[in-house]
Image (spheres, helix red, strand yellow):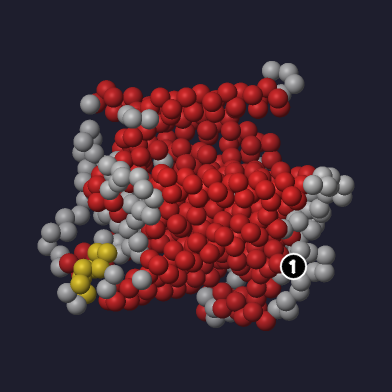
Amino acid sequence: MPIAEIIITLIKIVFILLVILTGVAYYSFAERKIGGWIQDRVGPNRAGPWGILQPLADGVKFFFKEEVIPHHVDRPLYILAPALAMIPALITFAVVPFGSRITLFGHAIPMQIADVNIGLLYIFAIASLGVYGIVLAGWASNNKYSLLGALRSSAQMISYELSLGLSIVGILMVYETLRLNQIVVHQGGMLEWFPYLPRWGIFVQPLGFLIFIIAAFAETNRIPFDLPEGEAEIVAGYHTEYGSMKFAFFFMAEYANMITSSAVIATLFFGGWQVPYLNLAGFSPFAVAVIHLTAFAAKTLFFAFLFIWVRWSLPRFRYDQLMGLGWKVMLPLALVNILVTGLIYVVKY
Amino acid sequence: MLEKILFYTFGCGAVLTALGMITRRNAVYSAVYLVGCFCCVAGLYVLLNAQFLAAVQVIVYAGAIMVLFIFVIMLLRSDSPAEGTETISFQRIFGFVFSLILLFQIGFIMKAVVLTAPAAEYTTEKIASIGNTELVGQLLFTKYLYPFEVVSILLLAAIIGAVVLAKKKI
């Protein structure tokens, strides 16, 4: 690998990390502000105009809080757990294509950190490691509520990971590749049987999309699936014993996971950086790159908004309802989806 | 150069985490070390151009099986070492002898088969041209179809067995 390529990759990594971390800060602000509007309140409005400096104030507060480590915890794992929650949340984005390619100084730079041939599997591998931060936090806290939260979380994540994995098998059968950039390229153009709609994953795999988005909500521990931290029953679940920056890590990991999930949903089911109904032939390559980047950002932002919208609209599930939905509804539906997709393929070819 | 650094990082990581796993008294720590070991081995698979295997290694072993292990360990609350651990008086000698035999066996197999075997038909270039995952899929549904189906029936039997054991009344 020539030096230039390494430098370009490093720049892309720093860029993505900066975007995600800033995104996390303003995502939490957006959540409070939109939550305020949905509930007919004002939301945070004291720090700066319209409260836009609130995330900065939060960050400063987290940094200057006293680090308290309770004496009854298992120290090494107690300290390791927040980091284990944060790392998977940040490295998943490595394979997500956030644009087509941009030409700078005669170099065509693909807007994706790593175009690996197992892109989709990589996302699932990293997502399946995300549970360790929560489980170890709950165990190391040495507290009954924390442990209950951790147990709930691991059971929930195992259950919904199955549906999540099976729901994308349909996508694999349709687009015949694991490379995320290829999947996006295949989503360009219009549907063969109904040429007024773009060939997006949601129109090819509607049931797969529904299962995927529900499972994604469960995997990110968001309402209506936020039982691991159900405050009415188990205080704050796995992060009951955490404070200051360590708590902030769990908090940031949740929002980073939501941003990544939104990006993956946009990539798999909404054409990623593709813009339908728009003939880009007359534009300069640079303008096309910017349009693609904007399209991807807009789609991701929409799903990020959906996460907030759902949170402030729905109540929390009961635990048995959660498990019943995961195993008795989602899993059979995901299998039916694979079966139907396969049947259509057999009839078609 | 980069590959060598990565190989030694993952290799040393795998050995150290494996040692950590068998020397810890606390079962949760052992499990965490084992997860680290699986991830290091997955890294080695990537260096060997077996990306699909690496991803499956992480998804199945580190992500699913070990989560279940930790789940069970936490449910049993066996975070303190078992008190009445039984020891057989001569188990150390036995262990030493058997590990020596195992070491010789590994060495023998390496010398007889792995190091001297002729190159297989799937070279790195060929794998790259067909695609890693595609090739695994093709082989599973052609050459290894029978073992593949037998394994799936075995797993089905295990699932039914687990349901029968867990449910008193069906």
In this rendered view, identify the residue nearer to me: A313 or B125.
B125
**In the picture, residue B133 is in which quadrant?**
top left
Q: Which residue is mark 1?
A: A75
> How many tags in the picture?
1
Looking at this view, is A348 or A129 the one in front?
Answer: A129
Q: Secondary structure at mark 1?
A: helix
Q: Dividing the image into 4 quarters, which one contains the N terminus of chain A?
A: bottom left
Q: Is residue A39 visible?
A: no
Chain letter for mark 1, please: A
Q: Is residue A225 left or right of residue B73?
A: left
Look at the image and tell me whether residue A3 can be seen. yes
Q: Position of residue A136 (x, y in %)?
A: 68, 57
Residue at 59% from the left image edge and 40% from the top image edge:
A159
Residue at 65% x, 60% y: name it: B20
Task: Give the side of residue A195 with respect to residue A235, left or right.
Answer: left
Q: Is residue A249 above or below residue A67?
A: above
**Looking at the picture, how far across and down is residue A137, in whole percent?**
69, 59
Q: Is residue A209 above or below residue A28?
A: above
Query: Residue A234 appears at what percent x and percent y?
Result: 76, 52
Q: Amino acid at mark 1?
A: Arg
Measuring 70% from the left and 78% from the top, which residue is drawn there? A65
Residue in view at x 55 percent, y 31 percent:
A329
Q: Is residue A282 above or below residue A327?
A: below
Viewed as shown, does residue A299 lie left or right of B63?
left
Location of residue A16 in the rendering, given as x and y in whole percent from the top left corner: 41, 69
